[in-house]
Amino acid sequence: MSSEEHWKRALESWKVRISSFGKIQMQNLMARVSGQTANELVSQSRSGIGMTVRTNLTWIRRFVFFSVFLIGWELIARSGLWEEYLFPAPSAVATTLYTGLLKGQYLEGVAVSLQRIAIGYGISVVFGVALGALLARSKLAADTVGLLVIGLQALPSVCWLPLAILWFGLNESAIEFVVVMGSLFSIVLGVRDGIANTPPIYVKAARNLGAVGLRLYTTVILPAALPSI
C-alpha cells in the first residue's frame, strides 16, 4: 500500500469519527434543550394555574365581604334605629333607582345639569379669555389682579354657595353663579399661561404677514393658547 492511499484512508477515518462525534453532540444538545423546554412549559403551566387560583380566591373574598356588608346594612336599616330617610335600606335604594330609571327622572336631571354646566362654562370662557389676555398683556394687571385671581382660584366651588344663595336666592341663577366662579379663575390662569408660552416665532411671522391687534389674537395667539384653556 502506498503512502498516499494510507493517508487517504486515515483522513476518511477521521472524517467518519468527527461526523459521528458531531451527531452525538447535537443529539445531546437537542435532548438538553427539549428537557429545558419541557421544564419551562411545566413551570409556566403551574404558574398560570396558581395565578388563576389566586384571582378566583380574591373575587370570592370580595363577594363574601360585600354580601356580608349589604346584609348587615339591610338588617340595621330594618331594625328601626333611624328613620328611613336618614338610613335607607339597600333594597329601598335599589327600588328607588329602578323606579327613577323607568320614569326617566335621572335622564332629565342629567340634561338639566349639563345645561347648567354649558351656560356657566360659556360665561366663564367669555370673561376668562378676556381677563387672561389682559393679564398676559399688562404687567400692572398681572401684579395686581393676577395675584387676586391666584388666591381666589384656590377656593373650592362650594365656598361660593352661601354668597350665591344670599345674592340670588334658591334658583337657577345661584347654581350658574357657582359654576361660573368654579371655572372662571382656572380659565383665566390657563389663558394667561397659554399666551405667555406662545412661541415668539408665531407672533413674528403673523406680524410680518400683516396680522395686528385683535386679528393677531384671534388667528394666532388664542389658537396657540387653546390647549391651556
Image (cartoon, grey):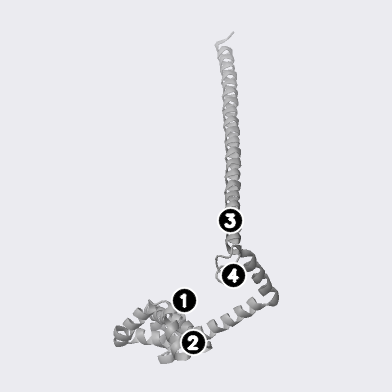
Secondary element type, mark 1: helix
**Foreground residue, 73 or 94?**
73
Left-right relation of 49 to 203: right
Asked if disc 2 and disc 1 are in contact, CB closer than 8 Å, the reply is: no
Which disc, if any, is residue 66? 3
Residue that badge 1 annotates: 227
Marks 3 and 1, the one that precedes in the sequence: 3
Give the Cα distance between marks 2 and 1.
Answer: 30 Å
Secondary element type, mark 3: helix
Give the Cα distance between marks 4 and 3.
Answer: 22 Å
Marks 4 and 3, the one that precedes in the sequence: 3
Give the Cα distance between marks 3 and 1.
Answer: 43 Å
Residue type pointed to by label 2: Ala
Above or below 87: residue 161? below
Residue that badge 4 annotates: 84
**Foreground residue, 223 or 174?**
174
Query: How would you rate the neighbour count of disc 1 (Cα within 10 Å): few for under 14, some for 14-19, many for 20 or more?
Result: few
Secondary element type, mark 4: loop
The residue most toward the top is 1
Give the Cα distance between marks 3 and 2.
Answer: 40 Å
Left-right relation of 220 to 73: left
Marks 1 and 4, the one that precedes in the sequence: 4
Give the Cα distance between marks 1 and 4.
Answer: 48 Å
Residue type pointed to by label 4: Glu
Asked if disc 4 and disc 2 are in contact, CB closer than 8 Å, the reply is: no
